[in-house]
Amino acid sequence: MAILDILKYPDPRLKEVAAEVSCFDDGLREFIRDLEETMRAGPGGVGIAAPQVGCMQRIVIVDVSSKPKIKQHGRLVLINPEIMQWDGMARGREGCMSVPDYTGNVIRAKNIKLRAQDEEGETHDYEMEGFEARAVQHEIDHLDGLLFLDRLVSRRNDLFERKVYK
Ligand SMILES: [Zn+2]
């Protein structure tokens, strides 16, 4: 296993659109283990997308189980994820390992219906809400070359320098 280097804004590779995964082999599963280790090594790492480590494939990991008292599915490996339905809107604060110095307020769908494959290539459908739905939408954006910075309504009002608590 290995902790991979995280690309940081404004690295141009973060703007690339990732390709569909078609080969579900041991190499893919090994990469996913490294990607997950990288996510868990980061501060507050509740999600990561393959393009953040320079791998332009449609692979996302989300695990919001560290947040108490919310509806969630635990550890999720989402390959070729597709949001089938959006419902409601909510504003919330987001951070990103690729944008370490800032957080921002972003409007996302409250509820989503999602279809994705797992690391064996099996297709699953999910219904998600709240923080988990937000995390998944944030990570899927990475697959399409978008950062939360691209979704701020106003840089002046919705972008915040991250405070370091001592
Ligand atoms: Zn991110």
Image: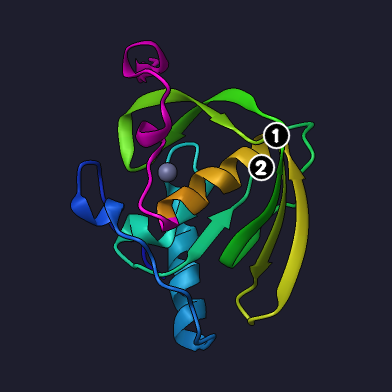
Side (left or right) of 114 relative to 135:
right
Residue 150 in the image: state x and y as whole percent. Answer: 36, 35
Name the element at disc 1.
loop
Question: Residue at the spot x=65%, y=36% of the render?
Answer: 109
In x, y percent, where is residue 121? 63, 81
Q: Nearer the viewer, residue 4 or 144?
A: 144
Viewer-proximal residue among 2 and 36: 36
Which residue appears at 32% of the width and 36% of the height?
A: 99
Question: Which residue is found at the position 58% from the left and 22% from the top?
Answer: 91
Q: Is residue 156 magenta?
A: yes
Q: Where does label 2 land, which residue?
A: 133
Q: Quadrant of the N terminus?
A: bottom left
Q: Nearer the viewer, mark 1 or mark 2?
A: 1
Residue furthest out toward the left: 11
Label 1 Cα neighbours within 10 Å, binned few <14 / some 14-19 / many ≥20: some
Q: Quadrant of ligand 1?
A: top left
In the image: residue 8, left or right of residue 3: left
Q: Is residue 40 visible?
A: no
For mark 2, does the 10 Å Cα neighbourhood hold few (<14), some (14 to 19), or many (20 or more) residues?
many
| Position in image of residue 68 (x %, y %) | 74, 32
Query: Which type of secondary structure does the marked residue at label 2 adopt?
Result: helix
- Which coloring applies here? rainbow
Type of amino acid under label 1? Lys
Looking at the image, residue 81 lies above or below residue 19? above
Between disc 1 and disc 2, whose residue precedes?
A: 1
Q: CA distance from mark 1 to mark 2?
A: 7 Å
Residue interval drawn in magenta: 143-166
Task: Evaluate if marks 1 and 2 touch, with contact meaning CB atoms under 8 Å apart.
Answer: yes
In the image, which disc is placed on residue 110?
A: 1
Depth order, front residue of 128/162 = 128
Q: Which dot marks residue 132?
A: none
The response on whether ligand 1 sits within 8 Å of label 2 is: no
